[in-house]
Image (cartoon, coloured by chain):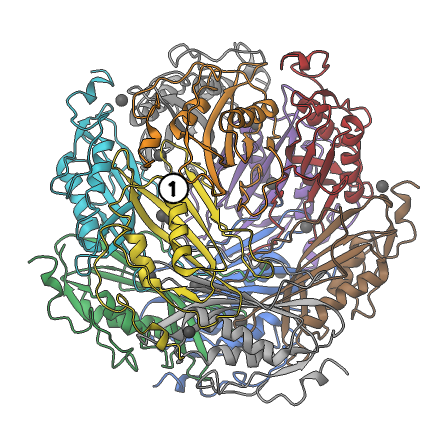
Chain colours: A orange, B red, C purple, E cyan, F yellow, G brown, H blue, I green
């Protein structure tokens, strides 16, 4: 199977696709892993994540970083972008939201391993970071630290 | 139980709450962990901590970072902010204060694991940092380094 | 007059002095400028400033940097520390507070020139910085940029 | 007039206010400048700005920094936050949007001087920054550089 | 004229456009300046520039930063991207190439002012940077420093 | 065998060699490891990698870092440079391309161990990083972290 | 025993104490560990260390960082400051001096574990760093990296 | 006059010279400026400065940076080092000490221009920086900013 | 004249040229400025400069940065590299060496303007930087700051 | 044995020693380890290393960092400096040279453990780093990461 073939049948790539109205309506898509059988790690950094506070309706912002070791599937990156964008007008708590995004990807991809770090912008002077992984990293696979610098206020 | 329900019964969230006069008077609150049964880590960075020196009465300042792996409970973040704010006019030694804050959270939350780093501003040219955790981190849970840069004087 | 003589008559230096209860009660002191007649600049960096929000009573934090070109007087640094500490339980708006501290020092010192930068910790995701100087910097005096890094959220 | 009085008559401060549906519907409010007659500079850093691309409907992100030298009025910061938040579901081009925000503030505040820097996240690998000021900075007023680091890709 | 109208008549925006084979074949396009009559500055950072050495045929790389104060026209950003991409298989000397890109934009846009900085990757251990502007910056327009960090070898 | 002798028989070193038209045409060369029998690690950082998107034909850019523990062979560095340069006009997906480069080197060198990190420039605001190693690092060999800073957007 | 009580019987705290003439004359003091029975780590950063070269009599400078896991005792920080200051006019070799300071603290405190890093200023272009710990860090205790940046000369 | 000749007659260079007991006893030496008649700037960075507090006898530390435009003379750098070292056991106030060092060099060298920046380590949480120059920098001579980063406490 | 023609007649480019034994023997070459008549600035960063101390024969190291505004000529970069390399076994004082390199380039190129910054590695703990320019920068030409970070010792 | 005694019998310390003509002629010296029996680590950072390319004769540069756990001996630092300086006019390949320096030190010192990192300046845009250690680090000895930042080209 050539690299190009793996993109056949996708519904969103290349066209002008509207932002889904909610995470539930977003269609996350996957493509066959062209290096299936090789244990490697893929990282997405998404510094443009935003959702709404479910209590106050005010916007929240986060920098998300997702690492995974694919099995049979890769996430198609445009559908990932649309999925993350679908939180734009959706209410979500920090801890729950971060872990849920990770779990949705696990459901889609059935990866060998996955983790997600959610680095939220401060509210009330105290930012929350959330870190979740499916398990201890698989032995022998290279997974560098995410290295997002800590929040430090001013000065 | 929906995400919103977990915030029912809280006494401080949303209202205009005065700063508690002391750590003893502060009411730390907890909410059910919406991802209970999943091992993940939550981090709070609090660069706005201040207390008083119990010997001289002069202000002390610290940058605190707290990591925990929740069990059945999450700490409610506004009550955490008020609790930390309650040290404002309270005397506290660096080593003792840092460890005590960690222990109070353990008592409230009964977490799977917790650690606290206290990065104190220098006095006499030599800052003190204090690092405490309840135990070695649980296997298979992802807990990144805190990465607070070291004190380096001038130049 | 020897260097030591200029410190005669000070009321707070060396003793164990309680934090003044308000800026009004704080006693800012001055000493003769040992290099009077020479135009130079003195900078104080105060990363440990805190006051209360006059509307909500919640703590505010700021990193202050003060530059001045002394005339006949220098500010005595321990009294400056106590003065800044006296805002601890005092309500103050960001813009007003920063400029007022600068004006109080001008009143005390009658300097050739003075400026103050107030770099406040974010509230609601948007920090306020306040910059005031008495006039354009005097010609021929060296006054480096303050160089406090900008607030940048997370990531 | 006391500091507290200047906040009388505001419609949004303190209450739970919904995000305005568009910039046109947002109500920017102002308060009397408590230091009127003194030339100083106020800076807001807003790293949480987002709008939509008017061509594709996809989200855009920017880090905005606004400096102004107030005349008779200060912008009320919560209304500024809501105004900036009102672009969330609004289409806007980078150059036009940045300058327009600056002009709206000028209309509201009639400041002695104002500038806005819009540092947009990259699209197609090439970010756009937009810089506008009403005029050359007024003589004798201290206005530090904004110091937002340049975009540099990876590595 | 609405914002959307200014994009009518463009030939490359939105479609899948092949990379032009040379700078001569690239079609740089312009749109009416929606803020014409207002003096502001637009910056493009292009860290993905590459060309060929005209002597050896080996690839060269550069980080380009372009600032301009528009007159009646803005450069359309997708056509700019394609124009810069058209140097991919084209021979060009560092000094000449950088200045020529600036001049081509001047020809297209007739801006009030323009500058280009070319920060080339090292060859032989000594990188070349090239800086050109059409004239001294116009008075009263805000044009921040580009702030690209200097090359420093290793260590 | 002297150090110079190990370079005998190479076809590309020292001469003016044209960039190969594709990775398939590139001739990767190897030289005997002068420290064969000693377990050490060699790192190449290649911040000048570029290929084409196989779907759109647009240029992609990456910062590559390759670590390996040589067995009997070292890769000859000029041939490595030409090999990496041969992707210039070649279509390649991020995940596949990065792992494939690693595998080609493994085939050539039969190293004790090898890893490759591909840090790709963002497309659509979300960069992809790809990490692959042949196995867990060999015990007792020193292999420092690659330490490429994470992507962070603007601000 | 209250927090204040643990400071009873100290000879140097609070008074104006002269710098001891040599390390031998310095009186290192200890206080009971208020969190005895809890395994935590205390860090001191001392960027103001200076001694004399025993061969040439010229000043040497170092940045010291000390980590320890207390047992029954904490070091009293003012006495530590005076002890470190006592090297001011004392001859000491880099390797020997760093390790000796660590050993003296071990003798005083009988800690569960201790380490000291001495980061010396360059002489002859090549700085020496010295790292010593009493043993492998105790299991389950959190001891972050010291993170002192490496020396890198100029540029 | 050859370069080597300008070092004839110096008393301290090359030999093993003891640290002078006080600034008064230190012998600052000068050599003819080999580029006399050319206006250029020389910078010394001295991160290893230390003196004693004249009130408490405790050590103080500073990072000094000296810039000067030589006339007929250059300062001999070893004598400068010994002069700065002579403050080791000497009492000195921050403002006075910094300016006095500058004045002593002016007396020795009669330079076209000189400035000194003293960046002192914090005491009581608030460091003092002192900036002095003999006059506005001479026109047409290149004198870069000193660029010492500001003090920022912790975090 | 085409770009390629300007390289005709050069003696060192492309061939394998030995390092000249001294600055006097080095042949600095020039090529016609392909953008003659346009005022722009060219910067070379040379972090690999080394010479010998004329007193002790020990190696010295410097990071050099050269900016110039060409007139009729550009310096040919390979000859510049060889010229700088020719100091390798040559004795040179810091101040004299830096200014002399600048003057030699002025003699060769007769530029509109030139400056050189020499950032020397520390000896005895105190590095020397040397800054020279031919005159105040020409009006209207863009010449960014060199931005070499200051020396700061350790910590 | 006193600290001073361990320096008896050295041939190069204190005197004016010429740079050895080659690594073979350099005399590396050792002194008894004053802390023999204690497992600690010594680090040398040598940012001033330079050799010649054995193929082209052009200069190469590297930043070297050496860590070792001494046994009975310490390397005398001046002889180390002279040894490293002796590569100045000597041809050496990157991989071989780095490992060889490590092996020569092992031969001299018979240390408990040693490692060397060679961070070479880029040639052809791709720097080589070489990492070698004698074995896995000894258990229980503290050996921090070297932390040399990665090469990243420009921008
Ligand atoms: Ca202090
Ligand atoms: Ca320092
Ligand atoms: Ca005085
Ligand atoms: Ca906030
Ligand atoms: Ca950001
Ligand atoms: Ca992009
Ligand atoms: Ca790069
Ligand atoms: Ca528009
Ligand atoms: Ca270096
Ligand atoms: Ca070899
Ligand atoms: Ca206690
Ligand atoms: Ca040195
Ligand atoms: Ca360097
Ligand atoms: Ca802080
Ligand atoms: Ca190179
Ligand atoms: Ca780059």
Tell me the quadrant of the picture where the N terminus of chain H can be found.
bottom left
- Chain ID, mark 1: F
Direction left: furthest residue: I1
Tell me: residue F9, above or below residue A97: below
The residue that label 1 is drawn on is F96
Task: Specify the quarter for ligand 15.
Answer: bottom left
Q: Position of residue I139 (x, y in %)?
A: 23, 51
**Closer to us: E55 or I114:** E55
User: Is I5 positioned to the left or the right of C25 in the image?
Assistant: left
**Closer to us: E143 or H40:** E143
Residue B141 seen in the current view: yes
Q: Quadrant of residue I76?
A: bottom left
SS for callout 1: helix
User: Is I90 positioned to the left or the right of E100 in the image?
Assistant: right
Tell me: residue I15, above or below residue B131: below
Tell me the quadrant of the picture where the C terminus of chain H can be found.
top right
**Closer to us: A129 or I64:** A129
Residue H37 seen in the current view: no
Q: Position of residue E133 (x, y in %)?
A: 22, 46
- Residue displayed at 32% across by 58% down: F81
Tell me: residue E14, above or below residue C8: above
- Residue displayed at 17% across by 68% down: I30
């Amino acid at each position: 199977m050539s690299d190009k073939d793996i993109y056949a049948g996708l519904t969103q790539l290349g066209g002008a696709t509207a932002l889904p109205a909610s995470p539930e309506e977003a269609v996350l898509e996957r493509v066959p892993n062209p290096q299936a059988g090789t244990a490697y790690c893929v990282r997405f950094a998404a510094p443009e994540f935003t959702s709404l506070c479910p209590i106050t309706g005010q916007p929240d912002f986060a920098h998300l970083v997702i690492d995974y070791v694919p099995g049979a599937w890769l996430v198609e990156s445009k559908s990932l972008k649309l999925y993350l964008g679908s939180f734009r007008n959706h209410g979500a708590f920090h801890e729950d939201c971060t872990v849920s995004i990770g779990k949705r990807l696990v459901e889609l991809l059935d990866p060998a391993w996955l983790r997600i770090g959610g680095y939220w912008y401060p509210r009330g002077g105290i930012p929350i970071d959330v870190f979740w992984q499916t398990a201890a990293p698989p032995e022998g696979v290279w997974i560098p630290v995410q290295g997002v610098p800590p929040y430090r206020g001013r000065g």
